[in-house]
Image (cartoon, rainbow, N blue to C red):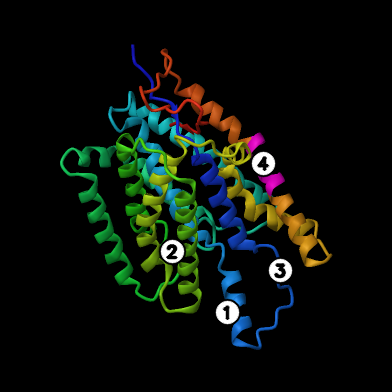
């Protein structure tokens, strides 16, 4: 009798997904309008404005998504072969494609522009689909080389790609046929991170140190945003290096949440972070097109944010969650999944699902 994939829970990842999705939303539509009519007449005022406008680097958040994706795909199979590659592909594409196609259809029906690649959030999802398709080949290559070697080759390929377009400043600038090459080392770092899970330290990580690391990652993403908009250095040159720091930070987060409970609210919200990422641009366009708001900027920002969150959650309830459940049913096995021993300690920590 075939045993299904291991299903355990790793605390904190859902919270991180949700926070990264918020980074993308605020990166697109702005954060709290503290300076609605800011005067840039002095150097100090310009510096304050620059610092505030670059607080949320959406592309850096997408790189974190890539690393988490590689981790989640490889984690259940890091020590064993998948029971069925057919089930693997079926589950992956049933979970991801129907919500994406639904968003495209909604945009077409409402006559809202939602291009498949350029100037669209869909570019990262296309890259993800390529990585899912390549995963069996990457596992086979792993038999002949370490993850470190594969990552080095992926970085070399990504740098060669950037050299052919040296003046490009945006990360998704290489089209659906080549952009996955740029992001591949980030995704592979997640696969490597999955294999490091079992080697995590058993000592409790101090909260102060963890918060300092989080602040450092945020500051690094801020620096990359400043570099993108105020220097000649674009995201293709910087975000792949950021992925290395992000992988280290995620390793520490995973270890940290083996001892501390994440917030229930963010863990819950992380379950529909894919819908938030997928639908937030559509939600904003619908609001502007059909329900324009004319009021002061602070009230407008609150109403827009509430609208985006509410409609994204509705999209999750109506489309993403049913397809998620369908994927489970289509690939269900006859035996119950068994968690690996020792991975759930300490027992007080809440856990976030890692599933295929």
Frontmost residue, 286 versus 108: 286
Mark 2, residues whose alpha carbon is within 10 Å: few (<14), some, or many (≥20)? many
Mark 4 lies on residue: 313
Observer-side mark, 2 or 3, equals 3
Q: Is residue 74 on the magenta stretch?
A: no
Query: In what element is the residue under mark 2?
Result: loop
Point out residue 297 in the picture as x, y percentages from the top left corner. Answer: 77, 66
Observer-side mark, 4 or 3, equals 3
Numbered label attached to residue 34 = 3
Image quarter in which the N terminus is found: top left
Q: Residue at x 34, y 15 (%)?
A: 2
Write the start and end of the magenta stretch as one range: 309-318
> What is the C-alpha distance between the residues marked 1 and 3?
15 Å
> What is the C-alpha distance between the residues marked 1 and 2?
25 Å
Q: Are marks 4 and 2 in contact (CB under 8 Å)?
A: no
Point out residue 306 in the picture as x, y percentages from the top left corner. Answer: 73, 50
Q: Are marks 4 and 3 in contact (CB under 8 Å)?
A: no
């Amino acid at each position: 009798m075939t045993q299904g994939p291991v299903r355990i829970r790793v605390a904190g990842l859902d919270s991180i997904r949700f926070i990264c999705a918020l980074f993308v939303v605020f990166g697109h539509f702005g954060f709290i309008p503290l300076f609605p009519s800011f005067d840039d007449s002095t150097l100090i005022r310009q510096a304050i404005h620059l610092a505030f406008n670059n607080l949320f680097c959406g592309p850096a958040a997408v790189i974190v998504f890539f690393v988490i994706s590689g981790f989640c795909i490889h984690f259940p199979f890091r020590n064993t072969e998948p029971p069925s590659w057919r089930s693997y592909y079926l589950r992956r594409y049933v979970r991801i494609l129907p919500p994406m196609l639904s968003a495209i259809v909604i945009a077409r029906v409402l006559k809202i522009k939602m291009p498949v690649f350029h100037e669209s959030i869909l570019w990262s999802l296309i890259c993800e689909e390529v990585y899912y398709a390549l995963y069996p080949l990457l596992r086979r290559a792993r038999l002949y080389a370490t993850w470190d070697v594969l990552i080095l080759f992926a970085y070399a390929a990504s740098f060669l790609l950037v050299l052919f377009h040296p003046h490009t400043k945006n990360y998704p600038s290489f089209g659906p046929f080549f952009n996955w090459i740029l992001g591949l080392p980030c995704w592979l770092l997640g696969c490597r991170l999955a294999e490091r899970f079992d080697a995590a330290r058993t000592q409790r990580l101090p909260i102060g140190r963890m918060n300092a690391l989080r602040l450092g990652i945020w500051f690094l993403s801020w620096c990359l945003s400043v570099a993108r908009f105020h220097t000649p250095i674009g995201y293709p040159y910087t975000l792949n290096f950021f992925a290395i720091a992000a992988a280290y930070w995620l390793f520490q987060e995973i270890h940290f949440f083996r001892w501390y409970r994440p917030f229930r609210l963010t863990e819950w919200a992380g379950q529909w972070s894919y819908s938030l990422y997928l639908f937030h641009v559509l939600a904003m366009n619908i609001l502007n097109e059909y329900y324009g708001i004319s009021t002061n900027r602070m009230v407008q920002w609150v109403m827009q944010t509430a609208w985006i969150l509410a409609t994204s959650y509705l999209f999750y309830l109506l489309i993403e969650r049913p397809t998620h459940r369908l994927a489970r049913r289509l690939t269900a096995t006859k035996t119950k999944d068994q968690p690996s021993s020792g991975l759930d300690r300490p027992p007080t920590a809440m856990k976030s699902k890692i599933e295929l």
